[in-house]
Structure formats: C-alpha cells, structure tokens
Image (cartoon, coloured by chain):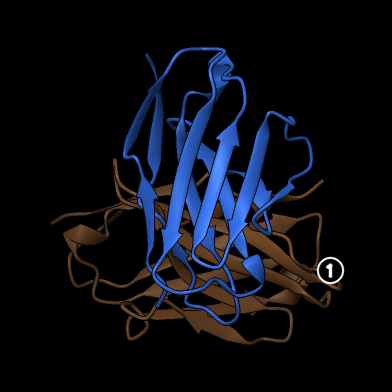
Chain colours: A blue, B brown
C-alpha cells in the first residue's frame, strides 16, 4: 500500500501570496495518478487536480499541479480568501487500495 | 446533473453492522468505466478510502478493513450499498460515496461526492 506524506501540516500565508504544498509517496505512483482535493469545514472534498497536473472542470488557473514518480506539488499562485482550507492528495494508480495523505491546512497569516 | 446521496443510521452500537446506501443520479453504473467509492473521515482527521465497485462488478477494499467490508451495486435502482461489520467507536465519522470514471484517456479523479452522512458508534 502506498503511503502519502504531505508537508507542511499547516501553511500560514497572506492573501495574494503563493502557496506550495508537497505530497511525497512511499513508492512510485503509476501513470501519475495523483489527485488534489480541497475541503472546507462541513463540506465534501472538491477535486482540484487529477493526473498530477490536469485541472478539473471549473477550477481557476491559479491552481496548478506538478510532479511525477514519488514527488508531487500543488501550487496556488495568488491566494484568494476562499482558498483557505484543507488540501489532500490522493493516489489512484493501478489497482486499489487507494490512499490519501494526511492533509495540509492553508491558513491566513 | 450528477448527484450522490448517502443514507443510513446516524447512530449504531458497538459490535453492530452498519449498512449505508448511496443513491445516485446523472450517470449509470452500467456504463463502461464508471465506478463508485466509499470514503470516510473521522472528526477532525484525514480522508480514508474504504471500497470501490466498478461497472463490471469488480470490487476492491481497504487492506486494513477488507474483512469487515462488503460493497454491492443495484444498477437498476442506481444504488451502491456498503456494509461494515463489528462497528467500534473508532469507526465514528462522516461516510461519503463518490464517483470516479475511467475513460480512454485514463482515470479522472474522484469528481463527484455526496454530502456525507455522519455515523456515530456509541452504546
């Protein structure tokens, strides 16, 4: 089973600044099947990025994903007030079991 | 318009069996590539993938929970059912059903989620 480790646990950023979130896998993620989700309190997660770098429908272009193998990054280029939330990475390569990271909280500095 | 909705008991006692139903619309589980997952989240904690059922009735389970989980689909009723046996207080959390599909381009990511149902395990 692939273990995903996200860092940092909490990221304090000012609105308008850039945020960089990391997700490291314990083994290579096949076909770059790595997704990023945003979750706000009391809400279901929302798909942001799939296939490591493809934005989901309706996601603003300030969100971008990169990486391959075992190292992946989510970048939010200019933080908007609505971007302060929890972010999870998930690997869904080959056959399950699939796994999520433990999350990164992006909070207002 | 794709929607998913979870239903089931809000409270179960330890050792009981939990049965959750996911009722969906806007897609069919008989369509090639379509899959439905169950994912849970303990209060204040991370997401945990539990199980998946595919259009061709293939089924997959969490390694740590597979002895307790059963997933099934009723294509005609647009429903997916998850049962979890021997419930324990540590199983308390919000349970989500969510869709993913495989296309000729590959997997899309889990693109539609239900709103979740909170299950509390307590005597």
Residue B61 image offset from top left, x and y in percent = 46, 80
Residue B16 image offset from top left, x and y in percent = 25, 71
Residue at (66, 60) in percent of width and height: B99
Residue A95 image offset from top left, x and y in percent = 57, 82
Camera-side residue of B67 and A86? A86
Camera-side residue of B107 and B69? B107
Residue at (68, 28) in percent of width and height: A62
So how many labels did they put on this image? 1
Mark 1, secondary structure of its residue: loop
Camera-side residue of A86 and B78? A86
Residue at (55, 68) in percent of width and height: A69
Which residue has dot 1 on it? B105
Camera-side residue of B89 and A100? A100
As displayed, is residue B73 above or below residue A19?
A: below
Indicate left or right for A65 with A59 as reference: left
- What is the quadrant of residue B90 in the picture? bottom left
Residue at (67, 54) in percent of width and height: A50
Residue A41 image offset from top left, x and y in percent = 43, 30
Which residue, as the protein is rendered here, is positioned at the far left?
A: B123
- What is the quadrant of residue B26 in the picture? bottom right
Indicate left or right for A4 with B72 as reference: left
**Which quadrant would the C terminus of chain B be assigned to in this image?**
bottom left
Classify 10 Å Cα crowding around label 1: few (below 14), some (14-19), many (20 and above): few
Whether residue A44 is visible, yes or no, is: no
As displayed, is residue A103 above or below residue A27?
A: above
Identify the subunit bearing mark 1. Answer: B
């Amino acid at each position: 089973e692939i273990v995903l480790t996200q860092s940092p646990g909490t990221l304090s950023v000012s609105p308008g600044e850039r945020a960089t979130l990391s997700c490291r896998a314990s083994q290579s993620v096949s076909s770059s099947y790595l997704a990023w989700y945003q979750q706000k309190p009391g809400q279901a997660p929302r798909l942001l990025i799939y296939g490591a770098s493809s934005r989901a429908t309706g996601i603003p272009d300030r969100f971008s994903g990169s990486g391959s193998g075992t190292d992946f990054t989510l970048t939010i280029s200019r933080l908007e007030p609505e971007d302060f939330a929890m972010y999870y990475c998930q690997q869904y390569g080959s056959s399950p079991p699939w796994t999520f990271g433990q999350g990164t909280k992006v909070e207002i500095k | 318009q794709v929607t998913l909705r979870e239903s089931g008991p809000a409270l179960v006692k330890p050792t009981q069996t939990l049965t959750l139903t996911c009722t969906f619309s806007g897609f069919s589980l008989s369509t090639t590539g379509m899959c439905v997952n169950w994912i849970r989240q303990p209060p204040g904690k991370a997401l945990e993938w539990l199980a998946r059922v595919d259009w061709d009735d293939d089924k997959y389970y969490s390694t740590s929970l597979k002895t307790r989980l059963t997933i099934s689909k009723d294509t005609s009723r647009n429903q997916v059912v998850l049962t979890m046996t021997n419930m324990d207080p540590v199983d308390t959390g919000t349970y989500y059903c969510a869709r993913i599909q495989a296309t000729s381009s590959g997997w899309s990511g889990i693109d539609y989620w239900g709103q979740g149902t909170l299950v509390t395990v307590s005597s």
